[in-house]
Each structure stands twice: as structure tokens, then as C-alpha cells.
Image (spheres, helix red, strand yellow):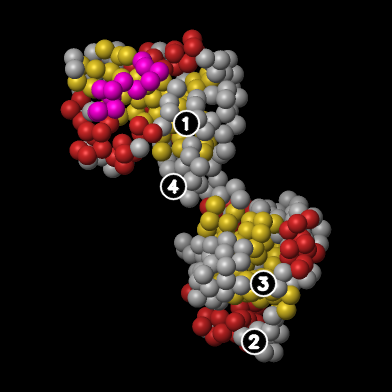
């Protein structure tokens, strides 16, 4: 078998991509449609005579200039996937050969401080197994404990990937780390409360809303954000009068009992209205005295969610507790949006989101 490196994709490799675009049956075959449009730092091909055994690329686009990803778009031709070689037998698999060659090329031909390989989703165990073999026959690679952002679309579940790290001169590696959805929002189970949800929704929609002119008192935002919230007529709110809203009262009482904790201060509920086509701009509830840090929201209108957390992306929900210390916004929707929110405030700095998860465990949707 012959391994070759190219700075420009050779025509026979491009022809191979076109063939696989029409004939490959792999789960992730779609990328063959556009790989020729991508610019890579290096193309590595292993051939058996005139047959392509495998190929992969080195990618620097989208990553800090001190690092790059080796083994990008690694593909082994189906005819060679049962190739009987193993590192335990001191023989090199195609993937091992390509990663080693690409690491050496980066080290000798660039000023990169390190490089890495990645796998979709949480594949830490698989990478650790490979790293163990690499250490035995080649180099001491490390598997990082977190998952890191590889593509721009954070709503794509394959965006955050497990990483095998190869040091050249530095261990610097500051790609964005993955944080699970439940660091931002936890969906709650409506069936855990004794509420007539349809009646609750009618009560919320029927309230008399006014401009939410004092919203800036409860959040920290940029000057432009505060100005928008003070002046807009498309973002309105009102307090809830329990005499006129018996289901809202029950909703508040039952949640208050569940949240009966000296570290949480339950505020009065407020109902909110956001006009269709209008975005509620980014804002943050900081952990300072007098500000609310959490909110239990129930969307009473026809369209649920989403809320957009800057560090995560869009999350759809009907009934949930939101970690509003994290910067967030509400994207525009096709319909007017109504919701009732129960603001919550930390009373102790030592109490945090992890403790909140335990506190509301009995009404989590997953229970």
C-alpha cells in the first residue's frame, strides 16, 4: 500500500468522490456531494495499486490559527474495511497511517502548536482505545474530557465532538466546549400539577397587557437593549390578579410548594405578550441582589418556544424552568406569543443551577 500527500486534490480523488456521491450507502454519505467545494490544507490518500483504500484531509478553516484537525473526512473504501490488520499485531491500519503521516506533515511544514482528530458525538471511549494503541506504537496522544465545537450549526447534534489531541509545542486548545441543554433549560411535566391547563391558557391570553416599561429593573442589558425594551409596544406584560385567575393562582401555589427552599425566593407571577414577527433581543439576568435568576414559564399561546440561549442555540418548550443567568433572546414567531412566568431569585451565592435541578426533580418531564 502506498500513502501519498497532496496540497491540491488530484483528479483521480475528485472522480472517486463523484463516484461515491452516487454509490455510497453509508449513513453520512451526503458530504460526498460537497467535499470538492471545501479547501483543505492537505489531502492524504492510500492506494492499493490503482485502487483507493482510504483518504482523509487536514482542515484548518474554522479553527484557531495555532491548530488544525487531522483525519478530517476519513473514509475507508468498503472493499477494504475488513482488511485484516491490527495495531495489536504491530501492523498499521489505514487510519493509523494517515493520522501519523498528517501529524508529521503538520509538525514539519507548519508553525501549528498542536493538532487534533475528532469523532461525532460522545466517542471518548473509542478514542481512548485508539490513543492507547497509538502510545504503544507511535506517539502519546491524549483524549480530552470535554466535547468541542466543530461546525457553526450548534443545533446540529454532531456539532460538538470528542477530541484526540496531539501536542507539538503547546497544549493551548480553546475551542468552544459543549454544555448540555439542561444547563440552560429543564422541561417540566404538566401532568405533575393539578391544573386545568386549557383554562390557565385562556386566563393568560385574556389579561389586560400594558407596556413592560420597568423590565430594565430586572435584567442587565446593553443600552440599546434597554432602550428598546422601554420604548417598544410589541413586548408587554402585566401582573396576575389571582381573584380573576383561579388557575393561575393554583399554578403559583403548587409551584411555590415544590420550590419551598430557603435558598429560593419565589416572586409574583407575571404574564407576558410578544407580538408576532418581533424578536425579544438578547439580555441577561445577573446574579446580583434584587435581580431574578430563574423563571418557570408556561407558554399559553398556540406556538411553543423557542428561546435562544447565546451559548447553546434554540430550545423549544411548552413548560420549563429557564436558567436566565445565561444570556438569551426570543426569536420572532408566526403567531402572537403569550406566557406566564414565575420569576425566582437565588438568596445565597452558594446555591446554583445544579441544586435547582435537584429541587424540581419531582416535576421534570423525564420523570
Q: Position of residue 133 (x, y in %)?
A: 37, 19
Give residue 70's quadrant in the image. Answer: top left
Measured Cα–Cα span from mark 4 to mark 2: 41 Å
* Label 3 with label 2: CB-CB less than 8 Å: no
Measured Cα–Cα span from mark 3 to mark 1: 45 Å
Foreground residue among 335 and 156:
335
Foreground residue among 318 and 304:
304
From the viewer's perspective, is the residue at label 1 or at label 4 nearer?
4
Quadrant showing the N terminus: top left
- In the image, is residue 212 part of the stretch drawn in magenta? no
Residue identifier under label 3: 234
Task: Name the N-terminal-most of marks 2 and 1.
Answer: 1
Residue identifier under label 4: 157
Q: Position of residue 41 (x, y in %)?
A: 45, 22
Residue identifier under label 2: 245
From the viewer's perspective, is the residue at label 3 or at label 2 nearer?
3
From the viewer's perspective, is the residue at label 3 or at label 4 nearer?
3
Q: Is residue 207 above or below residue 98?
A: below
Residues in magenta? 5-16
Residue identifier under label 1: 163
Task: Name the N-terminal-most of marks 4 and 2.
Answer: 4
- Looking at the rendered structure, the secondary structure element under dot 2 is loop
Give residue 23's quadrant in the image. Answer: top left
Categorize mark 3 by other alpha carbons within 10 Å: few (<14), some (14-19), many (20+): some
Measured Cα–Cα span from mark 3 to mark 2: 24 Å
Amino acid at each position: 500500500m502506498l500513502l501519498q500527500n497532496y496540497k491540491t486534490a488530484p483528479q483521480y480523488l475528485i472522480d472517486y468522490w463523484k463516484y461515491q456521491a452516487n454509490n455510497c450507502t453509508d449513513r453520512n454519505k451526503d458530504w460526498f456531494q460537497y467535499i470538492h467545494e471545501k479547501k483543505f490544507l492537505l489531502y492524504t490518500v492510500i492506494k492499493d495499486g490503482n485502487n483507493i483504500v482510504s483518504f482523509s484531509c487536514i482542515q484548518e478553516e474554522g479553527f484557531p490559527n495555532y491548530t488544525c484537525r487531522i483525519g478530517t473526512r476519513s473514509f475507508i473504501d468498503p472493499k477494504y474495511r475488513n482488511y485484516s490488520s491490527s495495531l495489536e499485531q504491530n501492523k498499521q491500519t489505514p487510519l493509523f497511517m494517515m493520522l501519523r503521516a498528517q501529524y508529521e506533515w503538520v509538525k514539519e511544514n507548519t508553525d501549528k502548536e498542536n493538532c487534533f482528530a475528532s469523532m461525532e458525538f460522545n466517542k471518548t471511549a473509542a478514542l481512548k482505545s485508539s490513543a492507547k494503541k497509538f502510545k504503544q506504537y507511535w506517539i502519546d496522544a491524549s483524549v480530552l474530557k470535554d466535547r468541542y465545537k466543530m461546525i457553526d450549526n450548534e443545533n446540529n447534534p454532531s456539532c460538538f465532538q470528542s477530541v484526540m489531541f496531539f501536542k507539538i509545542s503547546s497544549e493551548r486548545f480553546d475551542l468552544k466546549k459543549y454544555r448540555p441543554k439542561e444547563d440552560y433549560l429543564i422541561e417540566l411535566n404538566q401532568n405533575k400539577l393539578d391544573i386545568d391547563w386549557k383554562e390557565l391558557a385562556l386566563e393568560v391570553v385574556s389579561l389586560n397587557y400594558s407596556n413592560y416599561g420597568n423590565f430594565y429593573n430586572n435584567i442587565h442589558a446593553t443600552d440599546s437593549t434597554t432602550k428598546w425594551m422601554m420604548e417598544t409596544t410589541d413586548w408587554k406584560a402585566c401582573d396576575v390578579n389571582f381573584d380573576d385567575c383561579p388557575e393561575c393562582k393554583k399554578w403559583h401555589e403548587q409551584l411555590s410548594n415544590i420550590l419551598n427552599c430557603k435558598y429560593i425566593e419565589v416572586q409574583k407571577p407575571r404574564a407576558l405578550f410578544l407580538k408576532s414577527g418581533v424578536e425579544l433581543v438578547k439580555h441577561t439576568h445577573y446574579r446580583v441582589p434584587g435581580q431574578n435568576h430563574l423563571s418557570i414559564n408556561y407558554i399559553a399561546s398556540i406556538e411553543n418556544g423557542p428561546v435562544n440561549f447565546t451559548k447553546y442555540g434554540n430550545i423549544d418548550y411548552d413548560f420549563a424552568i429557564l436558567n436566565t443567568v445565561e444570556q438569551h433572546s426570543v426569536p420572532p414567531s408566526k403567531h402572537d406569543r403569550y406566557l406566564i412566568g414565575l420569576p425566582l431569585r437565588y438568596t445565597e451565592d452558594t446555591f446554583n443551577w445544579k441544586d435547582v435541578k435537584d429541587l424540581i426533580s419531582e416535576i421534570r418531564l423525564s420523570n
